[in-house]
């Protein structure tokens, strides 16, 4: 659950309950696109428009971040080489894991608490939670930084097999402190669904981090990796602090008892988020260590490059879920019909947006690797293709998982994440041992097959969730096309596989645009799309009039 973007004119006011965007109707829960009563249809259209708007806004800033990231990644890859870039990935994993542990999940729980208060228009509760959240984030950041320094030597030995990197690991304490404080600021922005400010934080931190990190690595090479990571964290903190303090929130005096009560609530729910994040980052960390120990440092750099590129396109859809869909679902979670319909709608929009991008990445994997990195990274192509399969499954499984989070079912959430982590690690160990580097990608794909089956079974019992008929058909179409394009290079020549993938990408993009123009009336389309897309098809217009 991360950051995103939008234009000032599209800000969502705090006083507007999030659940107003999806009014309750039983018929639209399972078949939201069939002919039903006009109020229901308009409500679904408005909801689709809101999801699409968030995704497009995220996509707009993501494109800018991708452009910035391309420059940063390519320069760092050229300066450091595969081995140095692998070291960069390992350091980043350590910092992310430590920050997740130190943060105790209070930033994610703060998003939920603020979103719930915003859904009921409880301005005092918003102010209290925001105030306590900032305090707790600072204290936890300081404690986490101290712990990073104390444990630097054992962490270095566990990671690299020796203590040579102890000083560098201790330097990551600065990253832990700055990112913990920044997380508290961003949580308030996200909980209030202020997408414009969240977008600006994302772009400003990416731009500032790039401008600072490249010179550091250029002059210091591998010795500049830690300063570069600290510089990125510092720019993120500066941007999040600036935009967070520009959001009008009531000024309240919070007593010690209220601070303790709110802190306890944040930490109780946050523990489940922290455990989940810790397991997720822990899996990423252990997989990198597995690749490092079994295949080598250069293979770790290849894995890092494929991992970064594989989730690049899908990332903006997943970010939109965290920034807008998650708070909106939280505000309406007590109404099962509305929540289930909202999840179905999010999955459908996600598939329509992600499907063509995944097919394009599969088709152009060699070109993408060479463009983003260099020809030295071409051995990463095969693992990138497997990662693409997993990212498509993420678009489907993540919205379902948010039901557990929005309901604040801490124990259930923890055990689902624990089951996924165990399966992921087992698959990684077996696959890397059997297939080498590409085994890490196979394990990622397999873990999300398991995750999808598990989460669907859980929320079917928890919320009565069922796939809509339209979603089942969309999944069949995109999964079949993805399987064909993925298998192409194994049975066809390179030119034939590229031709097949290009045709599939073009057809899927045309299909997605056609469906989106029918699901979302022109007046509900984001202004950015209305300027570039053609007029709604005549049959869609007549359907809307009916």
Image (cartoon, helix red, strand yellow):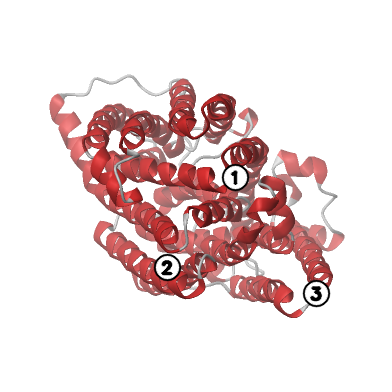
Q: Which residue is rendered at x = 30% and y = 37% of the image? A: 166
Q: Is residue 283 above or below residue 61?
A: below
Q: Decide which of tag 2 and tag 3 comes sooner along the chain.
A: 2
Mark nearer the viewer, 1 or 2: 2
Callout 3–callout 1 Cβ contact below 8 Å: no
Q: CA distance from mark 3 to mark 1?
A: 40 Å
Q: Residue at x 64, y 76 (%)?
A: 476
In the depicted structure, whether residue 117 falls above or below residue 408: above
Image coordinates of residue 451 in percent, x first then y, are: 43, 69
Report whether 283 appears left or right of 509: left
Q: Which residue is mark 2?
A: 428
Sequence-first tag of 1 and 2: 1
Q: Is disc 2 surrounded by few (<14), some (14 to 19) or many (20+) residues within 10 Å?
A: many
Q: Quadrant of residue 494?
A: bottom right
- The residue labelled by disc 3 is 493
Q: Secondary structure at mark 3?
A: loop
Q: Say which residue appears at 29% left-offset and 42% top-offset.
A: 163
* Quarter occupied by residue 107: top left
Could you tell which of marks 3 and 1 lies nearer the N-terminus? 1
Can residue 93 be seen in this snapshot? Answer: yes
Q: Which residue is tagged 1? A: 54
Of residues 3 and 546, the one drawn nearer to the viewer in this rendering: 3
Identify the image quadrant of the C terminus: bottom right
Q: Is residue 484 above or below residue 161?
A: below
From the viewer's perspective, tell me whether residue 2 is left or right of residue 38: left
Q: Nearer the viewer, residue 297 or 445?
A: 297
Q: Is residue 546 something that shows in the picture? A: no
> Where is residue 464 drawn, in percent x and y?
40, 71
Q: Is residue 512 above or below residue 324?
A: below
Foreground residue among 133 and 525? 133
């Amino acid at each position: 659950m991360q950051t995103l973007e939008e234009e000032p004119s599209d800000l969502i006011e705090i006083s507007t309950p999030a659940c107003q965007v999806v009014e309750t109707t039983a018929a639209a829960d399972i078949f939201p696109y069939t002919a039903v009563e006009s109020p229901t249809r308009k409500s679904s259209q408005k909801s689709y428009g809101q999801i699409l708007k968030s995704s497009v806004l995220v996509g707009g800033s993501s494109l800018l971040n991708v452009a910035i990231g391309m420059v940063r990644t390519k320069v760092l890859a050229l300066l450091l080489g595969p081995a140095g870039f692998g070291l960069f990935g390992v350091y980043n994993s350590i910092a992310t894991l430590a920050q997740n542990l130190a943060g105790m999940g209070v930033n994610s729980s703060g998003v939920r608490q603020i979103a719930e208060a915003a859904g009921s228009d409880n301005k005092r509760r918003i102010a209290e939670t925001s105030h306590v959240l900032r305090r707790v984030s600072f204290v936890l950041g300081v404690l986490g930084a101290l712990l990073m320094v104390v444990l630097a030597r054992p962490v270095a030995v566990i990671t690299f097999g020796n203590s040579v990197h102890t000083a560098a690991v201790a330097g990551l304490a600065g990253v832990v402190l700055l990112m913990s404080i920044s997380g508290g600021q961003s949580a308030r922005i996200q909980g209030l669904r202020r997408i414009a400010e969240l977008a600006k934080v994302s772009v400003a931190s990416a731009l500032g981090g790039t401008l600072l990190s490249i010179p550091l690595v250029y002059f210091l090479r591998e010795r500049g990796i830690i300063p570069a990571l600290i510089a990125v964290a510092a720019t993120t903190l500066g941007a999040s602090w600036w935009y967070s303090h520009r959001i009008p929130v009531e000024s309240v005096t919070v007593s010690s008892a209220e601070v303790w009560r709110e802190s306890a609530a944040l930490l109780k729910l946050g523990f489940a988020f922290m455990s989940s994040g810790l397991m997720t980052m822990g899996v990423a960390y252990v997989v990198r260590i597995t690749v490092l120990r079994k295949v080598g440092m250069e293979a770790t750099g290849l894995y890092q490059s494929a991992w970064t590129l594989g989730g690049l396109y899908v990332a903006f859809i997943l970010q939109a879920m965290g920034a807008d869909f998650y708070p909106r679902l939280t505000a309406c979670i007590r109404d099962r019909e509305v929540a289930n319909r909202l999840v179905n709608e999010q999955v459908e929009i996600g598939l329509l947006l992600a499907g063509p991008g995944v097919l394009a990445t599969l088709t152009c994997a060699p070109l993408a690797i060479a463009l983003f990195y260099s020809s030295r990274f071409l051995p990463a192509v095969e693992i990138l293709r497997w990662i693409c399969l997993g990212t498509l499954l993420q678009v489907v499984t993540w919205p379902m998982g948010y039901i557990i989070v929005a309901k604040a079912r801490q124990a259930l959430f923890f055990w689902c994440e624990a089951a996924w982590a165990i399966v992921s690690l087992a698959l990684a160990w077996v696959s890397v041992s059997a297939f080498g580097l590409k085994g890490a990608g196979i394990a990622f794909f397999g873990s999300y097959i398991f995750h999808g089956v598990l989460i669907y079974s859980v929320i079917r019992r928890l919320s009565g969730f069922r796939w809509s008929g339209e979603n089942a058909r969309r999944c069949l179409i995109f999964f079949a096309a993805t399987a064909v394009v993925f298998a192409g290079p194994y049975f066809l020549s390179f030119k034939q596989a590229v031709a097949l993938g290009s045709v599939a990408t073009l057809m899927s993009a045309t299909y997605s645009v056609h469906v989106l123009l029918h699901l979302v009336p022109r007046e509900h389309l984001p202004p950015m799309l209305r300027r570039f897309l053609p007029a709604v098809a005549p049959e869609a217009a007549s359907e809307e009039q009916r």
